[in-house]
Amino acid sequence: MAEVSADTVTLELLREAQEVVRSSPLGVIQTPIIPWRQTTLPLSTNCDIHIKLENMQRTGSFKIRGVAHQFAKRPKDGHFVTMSAGNYGKSFAYASKHYGTKGKVVMPETAPVSRSILIQRFGVDVERVPTPCLMNVVNRCVQEENMTFLHSYDDLDLIAGHASLGLEVLDVLPDPDVVVVCCGGGGLLAGVAAAIKLSGCEKTRIYGVEPHGACTMYQSFIEKKPVGMDSKSIASGLAPPFAGKLPFELCQRFVQGIILVSDEELKSAVSTLYSAGLVVEPSGSAAFAAIVNNKIPDLEGKTVVCILSGGNIGKDELMNFPD
């Protein structure tokens, strides 16, 4: 198999992937973009912000986009294993049930138990392990059980599927000044950034947002190579064991910078969004947290896109957030 690099990702490839995602039997939704001014959300900067409501996506997050493209490209009778803190696992399980494939999700033991239960309801096995052991368990499943590994963020088909979100943004706002996206392993950020930049929006500034305690892409930018770390954050979906190789290459090429937010800022963002009628999990609120805490430079008078990437948060979790 040929080596996949950032050069492999072309606008033609991304547009083809968008058509696959649009026509997927998994029912991926073209989620709405609403102007910030039509909400009750606070804003201290004079700019024109638009919110992409990916928290309303099928399975509750953007992950179904990449999964739809991955499953379309894989054998229909496969036996797949993946690692996920929840959202990718949920989409993976949803797709597995639809296609009738066997699957297993290896989850960090720090992920909410409610997410494991939800994944198991789709008929997919779950194995909970310490975060540093995730890849070891995946490798064991591949070697001993002959399973095929579907990567939850470092995979060309997945990233191309996620790019459909960026192309949808451009359908509504053809030339945004700034786009703000959460970043875990970097699959969504890489896909959105590639879609926007390869579409000719050379002046658009794209920022990824990570928690302080799980800043793998931020650290990778500093060290100029993908790195891993013992990530700890309330945003479990943004706390992978390492940054993806292909996402890192694409982010280096197309992303302006990585912004860091604290767990307290994420908690506050979840509460603020909830009070405005928007159910968004901590991982999904990272871009919003960066904007409301004035961490994105030079927004005055600009057209800005804020992606709310997921809404999978249970009542049990919401109980722990400030009013």
Image: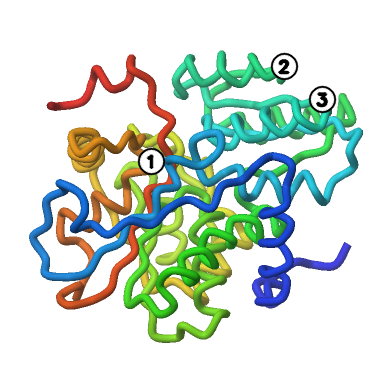
The spot of residue 224 in percent (x, y) is 49, 69
Residue at horizontal 53 percent and vertical 24 percent from the top: 130
- Quadrant where the image shows the N terminus: bottom right
Residue at horizontal 58 percent and vertical 33 percent from the top: 84
Q: Secondary structure at mark 1?
A: helix
Which numbered disc flags the more N-terminal residue, 3 or 1?
3
Furthest-left residue in this view = 44
The spot of residue 293 in percent (x, y) is 15, 54
Indicate left or right for 64 with 313 as reference. Answer: right
Q: Secondary structure at mark 3?
A: strand
- Quadrant where the image shows the C terminus: top left
Q: Amino acid at mark 3?
A: Lys
User: Label 3 belongs to which residue?
Assistant: 102
User: Label 2 belongs to which residue?
Assistant: 123
Q: Amino acid at mark 1?
A: Ser
Q: Which corner quadrant of the image does residue 91 belong to?
A: top right
The spot of residue 173 in percent (x, y) is 40, 72
Alpha carbon of mark 2 to alpha carbon of mark 1: how far?
25 Å
Which numbered disc flags the more N-terminal residue, 3 or 2?
3
User: Label 1 belongs to which residue?
Assistant: 283
Indicate left or right for 214 with 23 as reference. Answer: left
Indicate left or right for 100 with 181 as reference. Answer: right
Q: Secondary structure at mark 2?
A: loop
Residue at horizontal 33 percent and vertical 32 percent from the top: 234
Q: Tell whether label 2 touches label 3 (CB within 8 Å).
A: no
Q: Is residue 72 above or below residue 171?
A: above
Q: Amino acid at mark 2?
A: Gly
Disc 3 residue crowd, few under 14, some 14–19, many 20+, Cα 10 Å: some
Alpha carbon of mark 3 to alpha carbon of mark 2: how far?
8 Å
Indicate left or right for 27 with 274 as reference. Answer: right
